[in-house]
Image (cartoon, grey):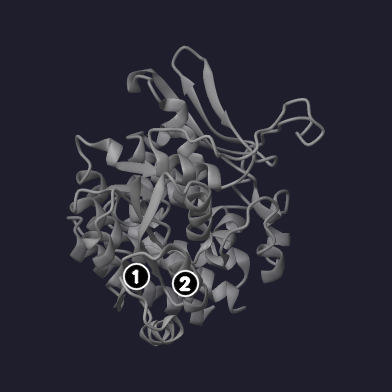
Amino acid sequence: MRAISILGSTGSIGTQALDVVRRNPDRFRVVGLSAGNNHQLLVGQVREFMPPLVAMADEESARDLKERLGVVRGVEIMIGPDAAETLARDVEADLVLNGMVGAVGLAPTLAALQSGKTLALANKESLIVGGELVMDLVKGEPERLVPVDSEHAALAQCLRGERSEDVQRVVVTGSGGPFRGWTAEELARASVKEALAHPTWKMGPKITIDSATLMNKGLEVIEAHYLFELDYGAIDVVIHPESVVHGIVEFRDGSMIAQLAPPDMRLPIQLALGWPERLPTGIQPFRLADPGMPTRLTFEPVDREAFPALDLAYRVGRLGFTYPAVLNAANEVAVGAFLDGRITLPGITEVVAATVDEHEPASVVSVVTLERADSWARRRAVEIVEAM
């Protein structure tokens, strides 16, 4: 039985991961859970799975958690902004699933890897912000870093057993989000409600807005660069509205391998938790001739004029140093401003681009320089939002 710890257990990834555990009680044992402030959901998770360690970032929520749980033997509750990092480092787990959202996930990612654990990574910001630091920790042990994003899980499957020198390029697919086919002028009038109505995936608000601007695809390009040691010129993005093909690898002989599955995050989560084994309790597969299967699979180029966030992410990825940390931080601020109704949807990318253009990068990438770049970018992005 594999002992696992789940960071961000009350979020979209965390709740689906616990569903995978629930369906495989003989395979997995939960030894740690962490959450931000959703103590109401966490109470039920603790009572069901009885993990020895629980971490909560928000102190007031943690007090409420303790009151609602009462005395539960064998469960220790850690409190504070560093609680998830401590849990990732100290919990006796075979695998840590990082399903946190945002740059706050980097420290727990580093802690899990530094302590020798295998990391199932759904927190893409860990690689966007600190890709060099993360990859340094798994040099010679790439199997300790398992991707959970559906696109990167797909690419990892397509690359299994293949020689890196035979890979010509990889293709990251995207549904196109709720605004596929919209012009730049139409996007300027998009509402928050429309942006949160993703046609395929059920996700939290931050990643749903990233999908609406296609910033999410840009972040996934940077993620693929680090995970698979690929030049940016070997990473393409195409729009695939049916969301059946999750990743494609093209080889130098012209052949291509694609991974197909229904759009259900439980599959890549299960693949990561069971790595390298495939478990028999996966999702219901498509029957290619069934009525429920799309009659055709379509692929379209990205409208880069309407969705400039993708090219911005490519540019930032190539710049390297502390630029990706600035991109991520400014994007988090700008997404929050859009959700609050203070800027338009295209304004998100405008804020991020303006912040990136003003950045003076550090010559050395370290935890300290990344934290400084992150803090500066958040302050500057707030100022730019207020001036719009």
Q: Position of residue 76 (x, y in %)?
A: 29, 73
Task: Give the alpha-carbon distance from disc 2 to disc 1, as whole Å.
Answer: 9 Å
Q: Would you place residue 387 above or below residue 346 in this image?
A: below
CB atoms of marks 2 and 1 within 8 Å: yes
Residue 109: quarter of image: bottom left
Percent across and percent down for residue 157 are: 46, 30
Q: Position of residue 171 (x, y in %)?
A: 51, 33
Crowd band around label 1 with a 10 angstrom C-alpha radius: few (<14), some (14–19), many (20+): many
Residue 42's mark? 2
Q: In the rendering, which numbered label is found on residue 240?
A: none
- Residue at (41% x, 40% y) in the render: 274
Residue at figure coordinates x 38%, y 20% from the top left: 162
Q: Which one is earlier in the sequence, the residue at label 2 or at label 1?
A: 2
Can you see residue 223?
yes
Number of numbered discs present? 2
* Above or below 131: residue 371: below
Residue extending furthest right?
291
- Disc 1 marks which residue? 54
| Image coords of residue 30 (percent x, y) | 38, 57
Q: Callout 1: helix, strand or loop?
A: strand
| Residue 292: quadrant of the picture | top right
Q: Amino acid at mark 2?
A: Leu
Q: Which residue type carries mark 1? A: Val
Closer to the camera, 349 or 290? 290
Q: Is residue 320 left or right of residue 184?
A: left
Q: Is residue 259 above or below residue 218?
A: above
What secondary structure is marked by label 2? helix
Q: Residue at x 72, y 53 (%)?
A: 182
